[in-house]
C-alpha cells in the first residue's frame, strides 16, 4: 500500500538522529540524553516522546502494542496506534507476548516481557530533581556530582510527617548504581519489573526533549532507607473479573451496589486469565 507520508511518519534524518540518541542512552544507563524533539500531530504531553522512539525504531516486520494505564482501547492508545498503522501498515496486537515493541503510558504489562522485546514508556517530566531545583544547569551539575540529597530529604520528611514514604507513582530509582531517574508515572507495583529485566526499556519525553534508557539485565534500585524500605501497593481484594491477586488492580466505585470494586488495570492480562479459567472475554 502507498502512503502520502514517509514510512513511520518521521523523515529518515530525524529517525537517524533519534536512534543515535537512543544508542547513547543505552550506553549510559539512566543518563538523560537531549534530542531535537519533532512536531507530531498529537499534543505535547500526550506521548510525543514515546511516539518518536516508536516511529524511529519500528520496521515492517514489527508488531506493535500500545497501552494507556493498562488499557488497549483508551483514547490515547487508540490514537497513537492509528497514527503508526496509517504510516507503516504494520501489524498490531493486544497480546503482550506477541508484540515486539510495546509503547505504554503509566503501566508496565503484568504479563512478563521476554528478551528481545522493547518497552517504550511515555514520560511527562523526566527530571527527578525538578521539584527541588528548577534550573536545568543546576540539575545537570547535581547529576554529575551524584548530589541526590534533596530527594533523600524529601523521603525523610515524608516519614517524619506521615510515618511512611507516601510517594506513589513516579517513585525515584537509581540505575546501574549511578544515575537517579523518574521511571515515568508507573505505580510502585511496576518498578521491580525493571530490575534485571530481560528486555530493553526506553523512556522518551517529547516536551522536555530527553531520552533515557534501562538496558537489559541492569540494576534498578528504588530509593529507600534501611529501616523504611521500598514497598509496593497492597490489594486486599481480587479482580472481580478474573480473580487475580497477582496483578495491579484499579479501584472503582459501583453505584448499583454502593461498594468499591477492583479489577485488573492490564486489560489484556485480564482477558487472558478469563479465557484460561473459562469465563470468556471481558
Image (cartoon, rainbow, N blue to C red):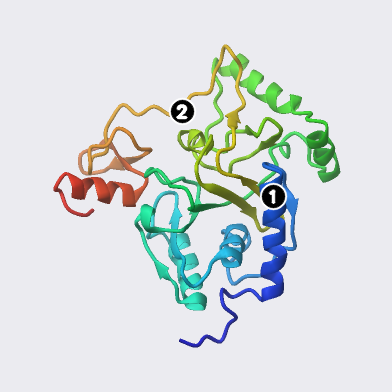
Q: Quadrant of the N terminus?
A: bottom left
Residue at horizontal 40 percent and vertical 70 percent from the top: 91
The residue at the point 64 percent across, 23 percent down is 155
Residue at numbered disc 2: 232
- Relative to 158, say whether 9 is above or below: below
Q: CA distance from mark 1 to mark 2?
A: 27 Å
Give coordinates of residue 198: x percent, y percent.
50, 43
Disc 2 crowd rating (10 Å Cα; few below 14, some 14-19, many 20+) is few
Local SS, label 2:
loop
Q: Residue furthest top?
A: 227
Residue 81 in percent (x, y) is at 46, 67
Left or right for 254, reference 159 = left
Question: Mark 1 sits on what residue?
Answer: 25
Task: Specify whether 234 is left or right of 164.
Answer: left
* Image coordinates for residue 183, horizontal then vertical, percent: 59, 41
Q: Is residue 119 above or below residue 92?
A: above
Amino acid at each position: 500500500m502507498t502512503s502520502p507520508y514517509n514510512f513511520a511518519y518521521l523523515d529518515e534524518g530525524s529517525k537517524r538522529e533519534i536512534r543515535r540518541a537512543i544508542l547513547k542512552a543505552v550506553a549510559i544507563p539512566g543518563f538523560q540524553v537531549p534530542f531535537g524533539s519533532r512536531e507530531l500531530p498529537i499534543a505535547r504531553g500526550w506521548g510525543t516522546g514515546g511516539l518518536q522512539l516508536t516511529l524511529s525504531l519500528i520496521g515492517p516486520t514489527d508488531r506493535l502494542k500500545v497501552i494507556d494505564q493498562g488499557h488497549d482501547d483508551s483514547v490515547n492508545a487508540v490514537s497513537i496506534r492509528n497514527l503508526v498503522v496509517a504510516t507503516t501498515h504494520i501489524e498490531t496486537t493486544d497480546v503482550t507476548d506477541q508484540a515486539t515493541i510495546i509503547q505504554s503510558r503509566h503501566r508496565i504489562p503484568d504479563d512478563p516481557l521476554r528478551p528481545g522485546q522493547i518497552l517504550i514508556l511515555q514520560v511527562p517530566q523526566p527530571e527527578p530533581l525538578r521539584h527541588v531545583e528548577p534550573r536545568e544547569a543546576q540539575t545537570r551539575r547535581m547529576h554529575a556530582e551524584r548530589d541526590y540529597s534533596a530527594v533523600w530529604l524529601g523521603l525523610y520528611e515524608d516519614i517524619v510527617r506521615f510515618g511512611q514514604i507516601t510517594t506513589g507513582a513516579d517513585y525515584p530509582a537509581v540505575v546501574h548504581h549511578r544515575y537517579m531517574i523518574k521511571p515515568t508515572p508507573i505505580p510502585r507495583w511496576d518498578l521491580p519489573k525493571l530490575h534485571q529485566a530481560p528486555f530493553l526499556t526506553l523512556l522518551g519525553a517529547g516536551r522536555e526533549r530527553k531520552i533515557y534508557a534501562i538496558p537489559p539485565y541492569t540494576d534498578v534500585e528504588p530509593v529507600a532507607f534501611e529501616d523504611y524500605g521500598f514497598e509496593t501497593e497492597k490489594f486486599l481484594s481480587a479482580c472481580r473479573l478474573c480473580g487475580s491477586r497477582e496483578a495491579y488492580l484499579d479501584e472503582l466505585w459501583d453505584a448499583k451496589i454502593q461498594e468499591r470494586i477492583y479489577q485488573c488495570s492490564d486489560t489484556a492480562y485480564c482477558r487472558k486469565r478469563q479465557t484460561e479459567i473459562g469465563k470468556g472475554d471481558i
